Amino acid sequence: MADIRLEGVGHSYDGGRTWALRPMTWTWRSDRAYALLGPSGCGKTTLLNIISGLLSPTTGRVWLGDRDVTAVPTARRNIAQVFQFPVLYEEMSVYDNLAFPLRNRKYPKAEIDQRVRRVSHLLGLDDHLRRRSRRLDPGRQQIVSLGRGLVRPEVAAVLLDEPLTVIDPAMKWTLRSKLKEIHRDTGHTLIYVTHDQTEALTFADEVVVLNEGEIVQAGEPTELFLSPAHEFVGHFIGSPGMNVVPAEIAGGAVRVGAEAVGRAVGEDGDLPPGPVRIGVRPEFVRITAAQATPGLTARITGVDRMGAYDLVRARVDDHPLVAKTGAGSRYAPGAVEFFRFDAGRAFLFRDAVRCGSIAPLDGRDGS
Amino acid sequence: MTGERLNDVSGDVSGEVSTAGAVVAGDRVEPEAPVGAALPRDEPGGQADTKPRNNRAWFLVLPVVVSVAFTAVIPLMTVVNFSVQDIFSPTDRIFVGLDWFRSVSRDPEVRAAFVRTLLFSAQVLLLEIPLGVAIAVSMPRHGLGVPVALVLVALPLLIPWNVVGTIWQIFARGDIGLGGWTINNVLGVNFNYTLDSTDAWITVLIMDVWHWTPLVALLAYAGLRSIPEPYFQAAQIDAASGWATFRHIQLPRLRGVLTIAILLRFMDSFMIYTEPFVVTGGGPGNATSFLSILLSKIAVGQFDLGPAGAFSLLYFLTVQIVSYVFFTVLTRTGR
């Protein structure tokens, strides 16, 4: 197994006028399960196709371990790819489908048979080997396409491009846990492209968030949730997304209008005065009687009852603020309440990038 | 309805006002009995009557019925009419039953033409289908080459039949035609389609291939274009050779369009008339006299309406049967 290293890799579909993928340097470490998360059109598939060699990057080099594979055609890279919808050789049986990549690579017959049977056992396809692949249900068809990747002995990474798009929701859970199982059993590096945060967070060791052609944050699912490094990550992960309230730093304090929300703590040194944006997740906003900073007052506009919890909607100077509270809360629209932020969970963003956090004004811990 | 409503009222009233109940009940015994007796008889009929039975929408089909009658049924019936009579003059005719069918189907000249036409269609299909698919596969999928290739390939399709015939009649001539002259003087092969029956056959065959392979190519190209990109990408990842990609991805997905192409090309080539008529006129001898040429000779040349009618119907039936067989076989196999 080998790491996949991207060195200044970027891609442009229109000769450099706009970047589908901004030049980036990034390493996919061996044997890990990655989720590549991002909205439609952010460059996820482009990135995947560059790794698998279906697309050659406009700039940069792709390394597989210590081998420069930038110019190596797809067939000779040790990479398997599964697409959005099941791609099968429909008139072939399941067995022939699984054997196809090996037959093309001129493996001996006995070895092909042995490998196909192992993979079919792993994927639970034993009972279907003789069936025509087009007669399987879409879930099984997608498993067969995955099997075509796993059957090759030298495969270093399996790339999955939104593989569960066409699968119905009930089947998705089964397939996702199957994928995790396979990852555990085979130890292939998995890169799983999705725009569904639940899929990404439940599946991966590490989530890589891509937006507008660049990686905005990568980390473990909890890390992305608890401390988003970019406003986009805050929006995109979590439901509902992070609250963003424009504010101002003056004299070391964060102010919304005339109200002091808390003390600005820069990540590296003091933050210069000027406009910032406060980002805080609804989960870490509490409505309290005691007006202890960090926090601010806001006028409640309504309550959405979601069953297990309530979403209290409020406005601060025309900017929405949402707090996630226990079910059965009693807040009347129009009431002015104090919304307190949990210690260390309210952040400051400048140009969408995190630059600091908000601490209590008196210097002691907010609790 | 009225009966039921009265019943309800009686129930309410008798329950509430016990003293008046007898009187009220007594009053309504009269209407109730006839209504109750009438109900079982009335109800089915009554309900059926209330259902709207307006079938005037059938009139909307009338234009189709009329146009089909005039374009297909009536002409066909005229032919049927000819085929069972011996017509000497507009007023003098006798009914001969199936005699014409018998004599036409036993006529050696017709039988020879039938075999000849069938052979021609078989050769046309064997040449045009693989060639068309090959052209489609090698046509570009992206870029400026696409419109250029499309226009170039479609060009022969835009030329009228008799013009195609004229072009080839001149092109294949040994003295002034570029093709014929080249074969005779550059390749050194003696080629003369007006005298040699093999040369005439080849000329007509190549002309048809030139004229109609583009149709197969365009149909196949459309079929190929509809294959999603990931299939080709998967083939790359699976290290499939060009041939394997064609065999396992492209060809299976061309089944639909190729079924149509085969049917169209069979029907067209089996009924080919204008081009061989212009180029060879059916000759030399009977070498290129296909069914349609023979038919027009009998119908228009000799004005034998009876045999021509029987011939037409048999001809029509053959095309129908063969097309049906092709269609059934092509759509049922490999399911």
Image: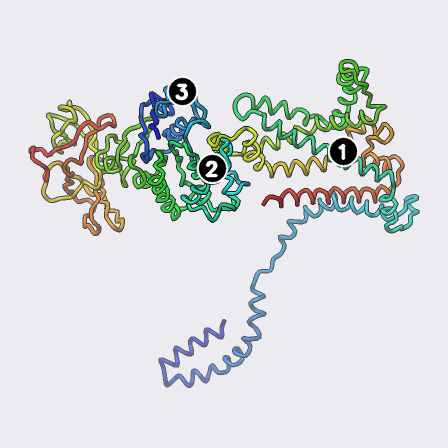
Residue beneath the point at 15% across and 26% down: A266
Residue type at mark 1? Phe
Q: Position of residue A191 (x, y in %)?
A: 35, 34
* A244, A135: nearer the viewer: A135
Residue drawn at the location 32% of the way across and 34% of the way down: A31
Residue B180: quarter of image: top right
Q: Give the amino acid at mark 2.
A: Glu
For label 3, the residue is A58
Q: Chain of mark 2?
A: A
Residue in view at x 55 percent, y 71 percent: B43
Q: Chain of mark 1?
A: B
Q: Position of residue A267 (x, y in %)?
A: 16, 27
Dot 3 falls on which chain?
A
Q: Write down the residue under mark 2.
A: A111
Say above or below: A204 vs B179: below
Element class at badge 1: helix
Q: Which mark is residue B120?
A: 1
A181 horizontally vs B71: left or right: left
Cβ atoms under marks 1 and 2 closer than 8 Å? no
Q: Nearer the viewer, mark 1 or mark 2?
A: 2
Viewed as shown, does residue A107 lie left or right of A160? Answer: right
